Amino acid sequence: MTNPGNTKWFRSPETRGDTGCAPEFPVAPVPQPGMDRRSFLRLTGFSFAAAGAAACSRAVPSLALPQVTADEHVVPGRDYWIASTSWADGSGSGVLVRCLDGRPLKLEGNPDHPLNQGGLTASCQASLLSLYDDRRFDGPQRAGAPGTWDDVDGALRAELERIRSDGGRVRVLTPTLTGPSTLARIATLLDSVPDGRHVMYDALSCSALLDAQRSAHGVRVLPRYDLARADVLAVFDADPLGTWISPAEYSAGYRASRQPDASPPRMSRHWQFEARLSLTGSRADQRVLVAPWETRPALTRLARAVAERSGTPVPGPAQAATDVRPELHDALDSLATELWAHRGAGLVLCGRNDHHAQVLVCWINELLGNVGNTVLLDTPSQQRRGDDRALAALRDELLAGDVDLLITSGNPAYELPGLAQALGQAGTLACTSAQPDETSALADLVFPESHELERWDDSEPHAGLFATTQPTLPPLRDGRTLRASFARWAGDARDDRTLLRDAWERDLAPRRQAADEPFGVWFDRVLERGWVSLPGAPSTAARACDAAAVATALAAPRETGPQPAGADGLGLVLYPKVGLLDGRGAHNPWLQELPDPISKVTWDNHADLSPATADRLGLRTGDVVRVTIAAPSDSAQAAVPAPIELPVLVQPGQDDRVVAIALGYGRMGTDRFTDVGPQWFEGRPTVAPGATVGSNAAPFLTLDDGVLGTDRRVVRLTPTGEQRLLATTQDHHSLAVPEHLAPKGGEVRDAVHLTTLDAATVASHAGGHDSHAELWSDDFDHGLPHWGLAVDLTACTGCSACVVSCQAENNVPVVGRDEVQRHREMSWIRIDRYYADRDDGGVDVVHQPMMCQHCGHAPCETVCPVLATMHSSEGLNTQVYNRCVGTRYCANNCPYKTRRFNWFEYSREDRLQNMALNPDVTIRSRGVMEKCSMCVQRIQAGKAEARRRGVALADGDVQTACQQSCPTRAIVFGDLHDPESAVSKLAAKSRAYSVLGELNVQPSVRYLADVRNPATEGA
Amino acid sequence: MSARSSHSRVFLASGLVLGLATIAVSIEWRPLNTHTGYAPEQPVAYSHRLHAGELEIDCLYCHFGARTSPRAGIPPTSVCMNCHATVSSDFGSLLAERALAADEDREPRRIVSAEIRKVYAAMGLDDELQPTDSGPHPIPWVQVHDLPDFVAFDHSVHVSRGLACASCHGPVQSMERVWQESDLSMGWCVNCHRERAADPRITLTREHGKLQPGEHVTTDCVACHY
C-alpha cells in the first residue's frame, strides 16, 4: 500500500516495466490495393449513379400491426415491470424484469428484496439472453428425436407402473431445489414407488460445509453469513464476492462493513487465505498464500490460537510446530488476536470442500461468539443443499446397474466427474435439459425445462423467505417446469399456475399472520412483490459445537500435496469464473465475451501459473501445455481423466505451487460461436467448427470420500510447443503514455489511487489534486442539471455486473474472439484492473470501472469535423450516430480510451436474440463511433415521467444501468449542480479525484480513492 | 492516339457528366422530404373526417398511448368494437332499414357495411358477432408517419405539455384518408423547439437547488438522438 503518485501500476506481467501499450494497429506497412485513377473514377461514377437511382423510390411501406384485443394496463411502447426471482447464479436473487410490448428486455435487482438488495450479478443479468436462445428444445425428445408430450409422459408413466409392480429403484438427481411446491411433487411421486430417493447436488459444492454443520451443530444447514456485521473477516479458499453461494448478498454486506467516510470510519479488516488470486482476494486487506493442502493445518493452527486466547482446552495432541510455514504461522497468530479482540463481530469463512476444515471453522466461529451474530443458524440459507455423499452413493448404484429409472435436472453428465459413464448405466434416463447438452445426449426421454422468465415457480432461498417466479412472456419454446412434469406423471394435468397456487394455498397460506385476508388477494400481493417472509420455519435448534467432532477434526491427518515442491508436480485448483460459473452460462455470448475480472481473458479458459513457476517451467502466456495427472489417484473407482490442452496465463498473486484452471468451458455445442462476430476475409472463427470454447476441466474434479473436490489433484504440465493467442483485454485501452512520448518519469499515470485507512484519515486529501485552470469565466447559467457519476473504488469489487448490465441496456454487440484480439471489443464500460508489486512479494489489485468521462473540456469534441460529438446543455458528452462519418479522430484524442468504433455491421442475424434489443437505444451501424451515453435514454425517460406527473425530478429517480446492477452501490449517478444530491456529496469528499486530472479536461466522473485497512506494523 | 483510347476518353467524359448530373439532381431537385402528402391506401377505409371531425371523438380516445407512452399507437381493434359492436353500418342505412322494416312489419335486419365487416373479421367474428373459424388477426394498417430509427420521439412529453395533435399531424379531422402533413424533418422539429425556447414565458427554474417542473425546450442533440 503506497501513497498516490509513487506506485508503479501495471496491467499484465508482460508489460511490467514498460508502458503497457500493446499495439492496436499493425506495425508493418499495410499493402495498398492496386487501384488506378481510372478504376477509381469508374467506381465513383457507378456509385453516384446507383445512389441516385436508389434514392428515386420510396422505401417499402411498413405496416403497423396493432393488437386485436388490448391488454388491460399495458400501453404499447410503455414499459412495465414484473417481480421475479433469478437462480442463474444459484443465489435466488430477487429481480425486477423490465418488459416492453410483451417481452422482457432487462433484468434488474429488486431493491426491496432482503437478499440481494438491488444488486444483481453478471450471470443473472445475462440469463435474459439465454431466454432468446434458438437452440432450446421445442417440445420433448424421445431417443434423440422430437416426440410429443403424450408420448414421453406415457413412456415414463409406463416405466413407473412397471417399477411399482415389479419393484426397482427410482432416483431423482437435481441441483439444489428449494421450491416447496416442486419438492412436494417430487416427494409425492417418490413415495408412490417402492424405492425412490431424491438426491441433490451442487456443481459448485458446499457439501462438506453442510456436513460439518451437522457434525458440529447437529443440523445439516448452510448458515447465513452477515458480512455487514463483521469487523474482521477471514476467508479461506472462498470467493464470496465473486462466485461463492450468494455473491450479490455477500457483496452488499461487505460494502456495509467498509465505510471509510463514516465518522468514525468503519472498516472491517479482510484477511484472505487462498492459492489463486480470486476476486475476493483482490479486495483483501491482508492476503496470504495458502496451498489447498495447507488449509486444514492453517485452520487447525487458527483454531488452537483462538482456543488459547479464549482459555478453552484443546482436545487431542499438540500440533507439530512445523505444520504450517513460519510466515503463515505469524499471520494466523495476528488474525487470531484480531478475531479475539473483535469476538462476536468477526467471521471466518471457508469455501473448501473439506469436512474437517469446515468443522474447525464452526468451532472457531463458536469460540469467538460469532454464531448468532455473523453466523446465523436460526433461519439458515437453503441456497446450497447438495449432498456429495448421496451423490457418490448414487454414482456407485448407477455403475452397479441398480437404478431402473433416473430423472435428472441440471447437466450432471458435464458437471460431475465420472457421471457421464454412470448415467449411461441407468435403466431409463429422463432429463430436463432445456437444450441439447451432455446429459440429453445420453437420455432416453427429454422433458425440456422452461426458462425462468417464462414459467411459474417458487423457491425458498432462506428458510422462511419465499420467492416467486412469474412468466414475463408466453413461452417461446414448448417446455415445462419440473413441478408440472412430476404432476403429470402422477396423473395431475392441471396447468402450472394452478399447481403453484394450490400448493401455496395448502402449505404456505396457513403460515401467514393476517389470515383474514382472502388467499387470492394475498397471493397476488406476494406475486407483485416477488417475495414474502413467513414465520414458522421449522426451528433448526442448533446445538453447541460437538467436542468429539472438533477433536476428530483437530487430529485429522494432513493431506498430501505435491510436496516437497516437486520439479514438475503442481497442485490443481479448479475454480468457477464470474459469468460462466460451472458452465451453465457457456451458451451465452454475453458471458463468454465478459472479460474475467482478474485475468481479463474472454472466450477461453487457461492454465494460470504464478510468474515464478512460469519462469521455472520456461513457459509464457500463450504457450499451450498438456495437463496430465501426475500421481493417479489410488481410489479404484476414479478413472484417470484424459489430458487436456490449455494455454498458459501468467497470473500475478498466485501461489507458486499450484496451477489454476477454470471450470465451465468445453461445453458441448459451443462451436455455435464459430460465426459469432463479423465475417470478413481476415476474420478468424471464434472457435473451430466441431470444437468447443475452452476445454472441459470438470473430469479433474474428484468425487472421493463423500466430497466433490476441486483441488485434490496433482498435475504435470507438458509444453506442446504450440502457441495460442488468448483474447485478453488486459492491455487494451491503456491509459499509459507510450514510452517514446512520455516525459522522463511520466510514463505511469495515476489512474487509480490506493491508500490506507490510516493515511486517509490523517491526510486531508487522499485523492488527487486536480488542476482547474480555466480560460473562460464561469458565467454560464447553471439552471440545468449537470449529470455526473461518482465511482467509489473502495466499494468496487470488480464483479463485472455493470458490464453485462450496460451491454443489455445499450445494445452493445458481441464481436467474437478474433475481434477482441484486435482491440475491438465494444463494451461501453470496462473494468481496468491494475496490479502493483508489494514489498512482501505479493500484488495489490485495484479495479476501476472506466466509462466515458463526459469531460467538460472534452478533447473528442474539438476534433470532430462534423460535430457528431457535442456537449449537451446538461453536461453530457453526446454522440450523434447519424452525424458520425467515422473519422475516429475522437477516439484517438480521448485520453481515457472509452470510445468504440463499429468496424463492422455487427451480426444481428439471430432474429430471436434480437428480441433482447432495447428499442430505446439506436442500433449503431458500421462506420459509426459510439460510447457510454450515461444512459441518456433513462435520463430522458425519467424527465418525461416527471413532467407527465408534474413533479420535480428527484435525486435517485434516474439510475444508470451500471449503477442499478452494482451489488455494492459503488456507482452513483446524479446532478452535480445540486449540492444536496448523493453524487455531489461524494464528489466533495476528500477521497474524490478525477482520473488524469492533470489534463484538466474536467471529467464529469469522479473516482473515490480505494481505501484498504491493512494491519499496521507491530499491531 | 489510338481509337481505343479516344473511345474510352469519350466514355469517361460522358460518365463524368452523367455522374455530375446525378449529383446535381440529387442535391438540387430533391424535394425536402418525399414523405409529405404521403397518403397510402389503408386496408379499412377508416375516415378520420367522420370520426374525429363529424363525431368529434377525441384523438386520445383511440390513440390513448399518446398520453403516457412514447408511442401514440394504432388502437387495438377491440377499441373499434367499443362502438362498432352496436354501430354496424352508417346511420343512413340503419335508419332506412328500420323504416323499411316498420313498413313491412318485421324485425329490422342487421346491416353490416363492407368496411365494418373487415373489422369484425379482424376480431374473428361474423356479422352476428359470433366467432368464426378463421380467428382474430391484426388489421395490416399501413404506417403513414415513420421516423428514422435513430430518432427518439416521445408523444407523451409533447401531449402532456399541452401541444395539440394538429400542430404536427395537421387537420386530421378533415382527412378522409390520413396523409402526412408535416415533413417531420429535423429542421422542422428544431424550429419549433427554437421558437419555444426563445419564448420568455417558458422557462425552467431552479429553486432551492432543485429543478422545478417546467417546460425546458431543449435543442440538445440527445433530446432525440440516443
Image: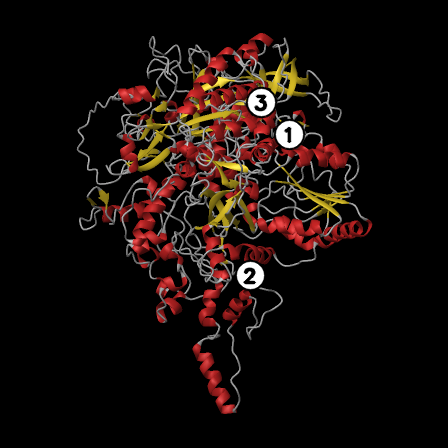
The numbered mark at residue B137 is: 2
Residue A632 in picture, x, y percent from top left: 71, 18
On screen, residue A158 versus residue A986, left or right, reads: right
**Mark closer to the chain start, 1 or 3:** 3
Q: Is residue A627 visible?
A: yes
Q: CA distance from mark 3 to mark 2?
A: 73 Å
In the rendered view, tell whether residue A959 sits above or below residue A481.
above
The numbered mark at residue A708 is: 1
Q: Give the position of the N terminus of chain A as an image quadrant.
A: top left
Residue B39 in picture, x, y percent from top left: 43, 58
Q: Quadrant of residue A130?
A: top right
Q: Relative to the observer, which residue lies in front, B217 or A526?
A: A526
Residue B23 in picture, x, y percent from top left: 41, 37
Q: Relative to the observer, which residue lies in front, B191 or A584?
A: A584
Q: Is residue A14 visible?
A: no
Asked if the residues shown at circle 1 and circle 3 are in contact, with their CB atoms under 8 angstroms apart, the answer is no
**Marks 3/2 same chain:** no
User: In the image, which is nearer the foreground, mark 2 or mark 1?
Assistant: 1
Q: CA distance from mark 1 to mark 3?
A: 22 Å
| Helix, strand or loop at mark 3 | helix
- The chain identifier of the residue carrying mark 3 reads A
In the picture of the structure, the residue carrying the numbered disc 3 is A554
